[in-house]
């Protein structure tokens, strides 16, 4: 019996007056794309916040989780998306990327949905020589080119209309939803426009820009003082007006320079007068508004300075920021699984109705450099020598080389990697003890074996404090001859 769906009675469409749509003209449609693009290009604070938010997400290790799907489907998804399969070796050769989809490039592009609110991508498939469908491109459709978004009565996306390319006389094009992948950040309604990460701080950004202009004016006006001209005491009622007019011109044109100067009538005065009293600290207000930009993405630690306790507080404030990044990564993985992976499986394997692979990412900030101390502990515990899933995951996460090949016959397998469990202190004690035996005349290889260090070949060299018998005897004879010569000469 076929599944039946109960029809919806209400609708999810919104109007201009329902209280949820954007009313600021600068943040609507194509104009919004221009606004957010300008911030990313010209505003150093907004660019800093965007990079701090997105770089850890891009650095995370993204993989394909089999999720119980058949092996050939998992292999196709991993191949088309250029992603490793979770649980498999990370050192497998990678096919050429020419003419294929790059997940890292797609991730960088889709993260633009954070400042723009939404990013649309068109799926492009190619049929190979064997008649198999491959996803070869997720082509971005920039928000600034989208002239219309068609939404169904139930709030679902139906299509987007894109403006014609420059020089294209065919006119606008309509892309249906079955060819689209849409990443919508924090949708507050069903307009499919999303919400920019900078929208909560937009009013502060506007005020800050005005203050920046005012700060520039104040610097020009008060940086060297205001020129004030005092007319000559010798001016008469008939000449004072002309004197003041000439003095005003001098004051207005006064500027610093090698050839700068002014010529005044006798007893006239020209002074640079500074501001009296306390003035408003414009820079402090600007910094307060810029702090609101970082708070809008929970990046409070970016507002800390070098005061006492600031760095300890940064670790605490960074925790909530990492959680926000992890939430964004989970949203990306869920959207890509639904609208990239499942669409790919539907197109490439139309007969498959079972489970599909998933896109997953390692926890944010889990990919760190391994310190020498931690590396030694993992090695001594045997975790890095493990050839199972645990060892593979550790080597993948910390970008360590793969283990050497195994060699052996039957059930007895000998690994090429030295699986010593001796600590550095134990080795130092062993070499010191073997050195004492060596200086006492014992064979060096046997001396090392006595202290549990085997497999090290001796190169025949002797330490400085130990000489072969023939060398020592020759040096002694030479020394005796030298003494006899000195005695004869005296």
Image (cartoon, rainbow, N blue to C red):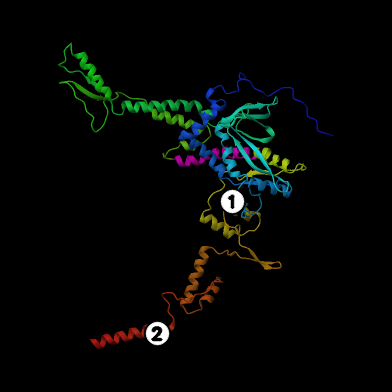
Q: Is residue 327 magenta?
A: yes
Q: Residue at x 48, y 39 (%)?
A: 313
Residue 239 vs residue 232, the one in the foreground: 239
Magenta stretch secondary structure, dominant: helix
Quadrant of the rendering where the N terminus is positioned: top right
Specify whether 26 is left or right of 95.
left
Residue 191 pos. (x, y %) = 63, 26
Question: What residue did someone put label 2 on?
Answer: 473
Q: Nearer the viewer, mark 2 or mark 1?
A: 1
Residue 385 pos. (x, y %) = 61, 60
- The residue carrying pointer 1 sits among few (fewer than 14), some (14 to 19) or many (20 or more) residues within 10 Å by Cα, namely some
In magenta, the rendered stretch is 309-334
Q: Is residue 69 magenta?
A: no
Q: Is residue 281 visible?
A: no
- The residue carrying pointer 2 sits among few (fewer than 14), some (14 to 19) or many (20 or more) residues within 10 Å by Cα, namely few
Mark closer to the chain start, 2 or 1: 1
Quadrant of the rendering where the C terminus is positioned: bottom left
Question: What residue did someone put label 1 on?
Answer: 397
Residue 147 vs residue 294, the one in the foreground: 147
């Amino acid at each position: 019996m076929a599944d039946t769906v109960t029809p919806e009675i209400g609708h999810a469409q919104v109007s201009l007056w329902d209280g949820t749509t954007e009313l600021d003209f600068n943040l609507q449609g194509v104009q919004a794309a221009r606004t957010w693009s300008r911030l990313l290009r010209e505003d150093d604070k907004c660019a800093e916040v965007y990079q701090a938010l997105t770089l850890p997400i891009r650095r995370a290790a993204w993989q394909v989780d089999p999720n119980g799907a058949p092996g050939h489907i998992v292999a196709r998804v991993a191949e088309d998306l250029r992603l490793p399969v979770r649980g498999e070796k990370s050192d497998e050769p990678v096919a050429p990327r020419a003419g294929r989809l790059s997940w890292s490039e797609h991730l960088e592009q889709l993260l633009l949905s954070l400042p723009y609110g939404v990013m649309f991508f068109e799926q492009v498939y190619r049929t190979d020589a064997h008649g198999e469908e491959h996803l070869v491109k997720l082509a971005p459709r920039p928000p600034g080119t989208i002239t219309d978004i068609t939404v169904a009565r139930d709030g679902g996306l139906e299509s987007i209309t894109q403006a014609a390319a420059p020089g294209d006389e065919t006119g606008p094009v309509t892309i249906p939803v079955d060819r689209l992948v849409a990443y919508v950040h924090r949708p507050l309604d069903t307009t499919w426009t999303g919400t920019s990460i900078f929208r909560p701080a937009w009013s502060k950004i506007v005020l800050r820009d005005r203050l920046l202009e005012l700060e520039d004016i104040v610097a020009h006006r008060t940086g060297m003082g205001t020129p004030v001209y005092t007319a000559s005491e010798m001016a008469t009622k008939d000449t004072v007006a002309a004197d003041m007019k000439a003095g005003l011109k001098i004051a207005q044109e006064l500027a610093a320079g090698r050839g700068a100067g002014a010529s005044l009538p006798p007893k006239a005065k020209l002074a640079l007068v500074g501001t009296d009293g306390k003035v408003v600290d414009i820079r402090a207000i600007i910094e307060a508004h810029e702090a609101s930009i970082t708070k809008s993405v929970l990046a409070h630690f970016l507002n800390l300075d070098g005061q006492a306790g600031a760095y300890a507080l940064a670790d605490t404030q960074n925790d909530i920021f990492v959680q926000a990044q992890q939430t964004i990564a989970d949203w990306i993985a869920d959207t890509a699984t639904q609208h990239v992976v499942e669409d790919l499986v539907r197109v490439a394997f139309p007969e498959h109705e079972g489970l599909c692979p998933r896109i997953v990412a390692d926890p944010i900030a889990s990919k760190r450099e391994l310190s020498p101390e931690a590396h030694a502990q993992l090695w001594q515990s045997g975790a890095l020598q493990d050839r199972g899933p645990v060892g593979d995951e550790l080597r993948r996460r910390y970008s360590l080389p793969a283990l050497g090949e195994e060699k052996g016959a039957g059930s007895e397998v000998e690994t090429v990697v030295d699986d010593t469990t001796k600590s550095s202190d134990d080795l130092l004690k062993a070499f010191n003890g073997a050195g004492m035996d060596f200086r006492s005349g014992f064979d060096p290889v046997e001396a090392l074996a006595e202290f549990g260090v085997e497999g090290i070949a001796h190169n025949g060299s002797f330490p400085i404090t130990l000489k072969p018998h023939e060398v020592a005897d020759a040096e002694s004879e030479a020394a005796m001859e030298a003494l006899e010569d000195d005695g004869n000469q005296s």
